[in-house]
Amino acid sequence: MTGEIEDTPGTRVSADQADARRRGLMLVLSSPSGAGKSTIARLLLEKEQNLSLSISVTTRPRRSSEVDGVHYHFIDPARFDQMKTHGELLEWAEVHGNCYATPRVPVETALEKGQDVLFDIDIQGTFQLYEAMRPDVVSIFILPPSIAEMKSRLRRRAEDTEEVILRRLETAVGEMKHWSKYDYIVVNDDLERAYDAVRAILRAERLKQHRSPAIGPLIDGMVGDLKTVLASGE
Ligand code: ADP
Ligand code: 5GP
């Protein structure tokens, strides 16, 4: 399994050491446009410690509101191909004629240090991460309470023309068909409730036993101590 840490039999591990050796997780949020994915992602990044955003590379031109190295690393198609050929990408996809990808090294470094990484990637990318690193991935599909509400949120957001809103709704049909491949489904009716649900998932997933390879030796040590206590009869 990815990132497993070998423990020498008999090595004592304290609870703090076991915690410090936790492997980070990859939190993937997906949603049909307008359901509230970006809002929830922003809240998580503001409020959660030990969580950072994976910054993708893209060949799409930078928008005036975007900063290179913050929103994306903007690169040319030749560099993108080079990264692909050299195995520098964890996953990649073509979206609306532009290429997007997740650079491998920053993610692997974070996970090894026990830091969690948040992803804003499309469905094709999510499935590639499943293939490459399934035990590390925790995926959440955010749903709107209804299509009528999703449409009115897109209108209220006032970022898109009616034509673009229609295109986003069409894309949503394809995306929503894949709901069953996600680990969790959260309905974003009330924002605070939806955010709390996502945070609860993150906290519980951090405690999954397979992310803490030193838990076995910690418990073995405790069992040894128990036997000693019982044998001494004190
Ligand atoms: P997405 O990233 O999924 O396309 P956004 O996070 O941009 O969606 O949210 C779309 C719009 O809906 C934004 O204007 C946002 O402020 C608003 N919004 C998000 N969650 C809620 C909610 N629970 N109730 C009402 N409006 C919301
Ligand atoms: P935008 O151009 O609007 O920033 O992003 C367009 C789409 O590309 C969004 O659905 C976004 O989630 C997706 N995307 C952004 N970065 C990546 C990436 O690294 N990999 C994949 N597969 N999709 C990405």
Image (cartoon, helix red, strand yellow):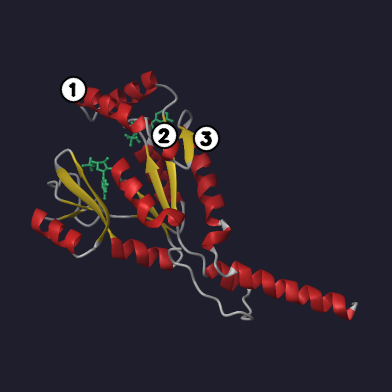
* Mark 1 nearby-residue class (10 Å; few <14, some 14–19, many ≥20): few
Q: Along the polypeptide, which appears first: circle 3 or circle 2?
A: 2
Name, please, the residue furthest toward the top: 148
Q: Distance from label 3 to label 1 (Cα)? A: 31 Å
| Residue 63 in view here | no
Tell me the SS state at disc 1.
helix
Quadrant position of residue 16: bottom right
| 3 or 1: tag closer to the N-terminus | 1
Mark 3 highlights which residue?
Answer: 193
Where 191 sits versus 122, above or below?
Answer: above
Residue shown at the point (15%, 44%) measured from the top left: 98
Query: Residue 185: percent from the left, percent from the top?
Result: 47, 36
Q: Residues within 10 Å of mark 2 (few under 14, many from 20)?
A: some
Residue drawn at 57 percent across, 70 percent down: 214
Q: Count the numbered circles shown.
A: 3
Q: Where is mark 2, residue-wise?
A: 179
What is the crowding at mark 3: few (fewer than 14 residues within 10 Å), some, or many (at least 20)?
few
Q: Is residue 224 placed above or below 76 in the rendered structure?
A: below
Quadrant of the picture in which ligand 2 is shown: top left
Cβ of disc 2 within 8 Å of ligand 1? no
Marks 2 and 1, the one that precedes in the sequence: 1
Rendered-image quadrant of the C terminus: bottom right
Element type at marker 3? helix
Looking at the image, is 169 positioned above or below residue 95?
above
